[in-house]
Amino acid sequence: MKNNILKTMKKNYMYGVAIVLIIAIIVMAILWYRQKNEYVIATENGYNLAFYELVDYIQDVENYLAKSTISSSSEQSAESLIHVWRQANLAQVYLAQLPISTNELANTAKFLNQVSDYSHTLARKSIGGEDLAQEELDNLEQLHDYSLNLKTTLEQLSEDMSNGKISWRELTKDVDTTFAQQVDNLSATSFSNIDENFGEYEGLIYDGAYSEHIESAEKKGLVGNDVTEEEAKQKAISFIGQDKVQEVKSNGLIENGDIQVYDFVITAKEGDKNNPLTISISKKGGHIVVANYNRDVKEEKISREEANEIGKNFLNNLGIPNMEPTYFLKQGGVMTINYAYTQDNVTIYSDLIKLKVALDNGEILGMETSGYLNNHTERTIGKPSITIEQAKATLNDNLNITSEGLAIIPTEWKTEIFCYEFKGKINETDFLVYVNANTGKEENILVIIETPDGILTQ
């Protein structure tokens, strides 16, 4: 009897040990699976980040190559080509991070290396004051065509990835080699390797033309006496309308920004309580610095032209006249419009204001005025020293001009240049070219990007 009991206890003990071992194995398997899954997710995220960075840099390469084909001055050629060199190098860095070793990506890497080396070589020539030969311009045009194909291919891959049509695992197994075959044609061209480094790169991406050159230490447009918090509160309320306000919360004076402001959060009576209006009013002068309100716009009833006029009238009522729409972007039933100040028929891109207009009822949902507040003043604008015909003579002969005028553009050194502004087209690409109205020097080139959702520049 005692032996039976001992046997039973031993048997139960063994069962218990077995169960514990099984549970331990299951737990370890679950932990291993989770760790593996987390590793896979982290790896996939890393690949995604590298890929989307690659797409961005390829878009920039195509953009600056386009600029280099139109430039008629050695200075502008050098600037565009240095951008091509740097962006192509950065694209190669992110390309190398992708888990793909197909012929297509090998050829893409070769293409980027050739673009980088060749643009660097030509940039050094332009920096020396030499004009590019026609053969070199033709080579740049060819490189631009290939970069356009590459950009289109990568943008399609990006869209397919976002839609879940393909995964990294599938991409490594089967990649279309159409572009690789095209890039192979470049192998006959000889490019020299350049090791010199021109120093830190600064990008040239615009929210609207010249929107990144808007800060000024002087704050010329920030005029008027200091206002109290209560006076600023009333200014904020007037933006949305007294009859629409349910609650106003003050965050007090914010002193550590570029402009000292009073911050407010306003909840509308019929608005989304989770998306209130946030608005900042400058202490000096009581100007609206930034305001933003998000709501759903389910139906678009207002055209682009009507939205432009609504924005102009809104600014006029605020005491800000002579503002003309330049570039816009439409998203989710809301049109964001950049307005530039005009004086004596001269567009002054330093004095910028951005408005968000709802396309269902024309409500102003947002405003940003830092460019205007930093730079606005009445300028003394003289007559150009050269005629418009003389300015045209400096342009690339292939540019088909569609409009022309005068403009003042800001520089990265916080100065301004009086220019002739020419809008034109080469092949299927639209450009803005700025020629100094006093010296005839080509000062800047912007690529106009037209999409169904807006008109922007780079």
Image (spheres, rainbow, N blue to C red):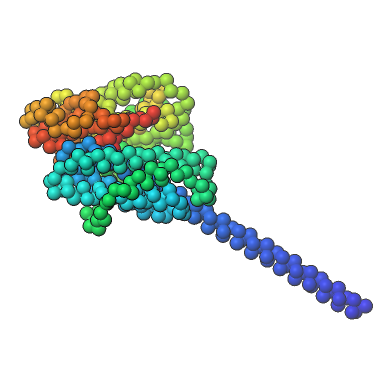
The residue lying furthest to the bottom in this view is: 3
Along the horizontal axis of the image, is 220 left or right of 363? left
Instruction: Look at 75% across and 69% down and name the residue there.
Output: 18
Determine the image quadrant of residue 241.
top left
Between 302 and 177, which is closer to the camera in this rendering? 177
Instruction: Look at 93% across and 78% down and name the residue there.
Output: 1
Q: In this orientation, does residue 50 appear?
A: no
> How many numbered callouts?
0
Q: Where is residue 271 shown, x and y percent of the image?
A: 46, 30
The residue lying furthest to the front in this view is: 188
The residue lying furthest to the right in this view is: 1
Q: Where is residue 219 shown, x and y percent of the image?
A: 19, 40
Instruction: Look at 28% across and 46% down and name the residue there.
Output: 84
Q: In this orientation, does residue 40 appear?
A: yes
Determine the image quadrant of residue 374.
top left
Along the horizontal axis of the image, is 47 left or right of 328? right
Q: Quadrant of the C terminus?
A: top left
Instruction: Look at 27% across and 51% down and name the residue there.
Output: 191
Vertical comparison of 31 with 322: above or below: below
Q: Where is residue 134 shown, x and y percent of the image?
A: 19, 39
Between 240 and 365, which is closer to the camera in this rendering? 365
